[in-house]
Image (cartoon, helix red, strand yellow):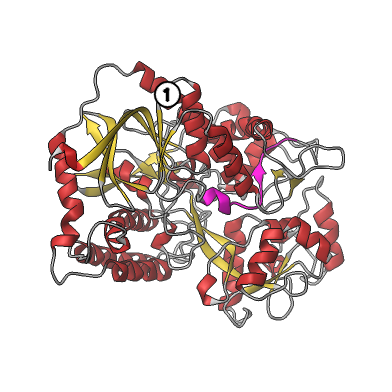
Amino acid sequence: MANQDYETHEHDVLVIGAGGAGLRAAIEAAAQGVSVGLVCKSLLGKAHTVMAEGGIAAALGNVWPEDNWQVHFRDTMRGGKMLNNWRMAQLHAQEAPDRVLELERWGALFDRTKDGRILQRDFGGHRYARLAHVGDRTGLEMIRTLQYHGIHQGIDVYMECKVERLLKDGDHVCGAFGYWRNTGKFVLFKAKAVVLATGGVGKAWKVTSNSWEYTGDGQSLALWAGADLIDMEFVQFHPTGMVWPPSVRGILVTEGVRGDGGTLKNTKGERFMFNYIPEFFKGETADNEAEADRWYADKKNNRRTPDLLPRDEVARAINAEIKGGRGTPHGGVFLDICTRRPADYIRKRLPSMYHQFKELAGVDITKEPMEVGPTCHYIMGGVRVDADTTAATVKGLFAAGEVAGGMHGSNRLGGNSLSDLLVFGRRAGLYAALYAKDFGGPLTVESSHVESLAREMLEPFTRTGGENPYAIQADLQETMQNLVGLIRTEHELREAMKRIESFRHRAARTHVDGGRTYNPGWHMALDLASLLTVAECCTLAALERRESRGGHTRDDHPYTDDSWGKINVVIRQRQGALALSREPLPEMPAELKALFQERK
């Protein structure tokens, strides 16, 4: 393949992914005076950040002055079952308030308290109401603000561009190779530093809140380039996704519904969450609404409504109700806000949810409950990074947001995703720019490697009588949903590994018709490489961790094991195969450990 067969762009910093983390990284890198390229797989503005509806977690102390970064840090660590990288959790809690106020300075329009400060709402696992929000459209406002601010920074944006591989010169990353999704033409990016901000892996599962872009690209790109992945066994199943009609199954129902007073009920009308934490609400019954309201208001004593427990606990409770025959006709449970809040309040606080159910399910949530159930939503694991710099274990590579592991431990608290994007997006852009400024010598890309990648990408067109890539993805999704889902066992995980191996053989025989222009079948054939890679990583890590913790529940190892609470499962690629090791967590300093001895 001659050079004229692909276009070339060169930047100091290349950011792959244009959600909250990618935009914030690009803005910060540009502010350091370096050349920045921003690549997005879809259109600018269509990022999963938009789907984060409830709010941005930050200890501003506007509703509860007692709130501070230490309490937020402690909540985050406890929510992650202490498997978090403590330094990431510390930086996140300390810097989140400044990042929210920065967004406000850049034009974000938050809901307000009566005295004009940013209003904050309750969310699961947070001791105090600390989510800064814009109704239930917070992610949309965040993306709008970052985009409007970013367009003034001189950032070059490459939309509908899919990166297939990172390129290396010796031991450091030197760029990326991919193609334009609309024309199918190849494109080469040379860069001194690369920031991965590509999001998650949800399209490996059948029922997911994630849309088509989430095929594990960043995790796979990093792994193939020689970087470490950690915590891939920890996949969060958000407790409340839509379950009916089938066409919208899995679409997210924000935790803000429960944060604003919504309650979970089974078909008997019972508030069943009380039954799953008897030690927390001793002597009370599931139908004690008056006491529930008192607990909901009594934040100082931390006596919270059980509907706002961390997501992993709520998802398992819902799953148990459904399996126990107390689920709805469509295989979920009821989420009821209409009996606790007036219609005007619901339409004002939850406008997106009101329209979502009205238009997609024909349900008026001001008059009737929603049907909800667990949906694959987020992965806590990802690229192993340095907490302060976000640097991966390969020189010149950085990662921020959902693609990076460590920050959330074994379970992410709602609202921490948006503040994570801002805090570590900024740090990724800053340190990638500093790395690029210190980079010595020319950027050297091996042309033979680029040509080999191009030939490999075109192979599905040359095969005859091969497999349909969509059929392989459907079979993979079914396997992950049934065997590597909310509840796992060794037998099922081993069966999943066998099936994933068979899918790899099938993927090597995929065939697509037509040309490279506007060919979604070809796109799926290429996406299968990353989908199968992250599926194997998640399954292999889930087999290794023989305990239940956070987003990883082993039915054959149902208890949390303290010995596993100090270990990351690390995955690397060696000679084309996955290599797995157990490595100790970084030690938390004594002054932070002391926070967990406090009662309040």
**Quick one: quadrant of the N terminus?**
top left
On screen, 492 above or below 15?
below
User: Could you tell me if residue 225 is visible in this image?
Assistant: no
Q: Is residue 45 left or right of residue 175?
A: right
**Quick one: quadrant of the C terminus?**
top right
Give the image location of residue 264, x and y in percent. Answer: 70, 68
Q: Which residue is mark 1?
A: 433
Secondary element at image label 1: helix
Q: Amino acid at mark 1?
A: Ala
Residue nearest the viewer, comparing 257 with 567 = 257
Q: Is residue 20 left or right of residue 542?
A: right
Q: Which span of residues is magenta-colored?
A: 48-60
Give the image location of residue 5, x and y in percent. Answer: 18, 42
User: Could you tell me if residue 90 is visible in this image?
Assistant: yes
Residue 478 part of the magenta segment = no
Mark 1 is surrounded, within 10 Å at the Cα level, by few (under 14), some (14 to 19) or many (20 or more) other residues, namely: many
Residue nearest the viewer, comparing 172 with 90 = 172
User: At 29% across and 38% down in the image, what residue appears?
Assistant: 176
Give the image location of residue 490, x and y in percent. Answer: 37, 65
User: At 25% across and 70% down in the image, what residue appears?
Assistant: 468
Residue nearest the viewer, comparing 226 with 349 = 349
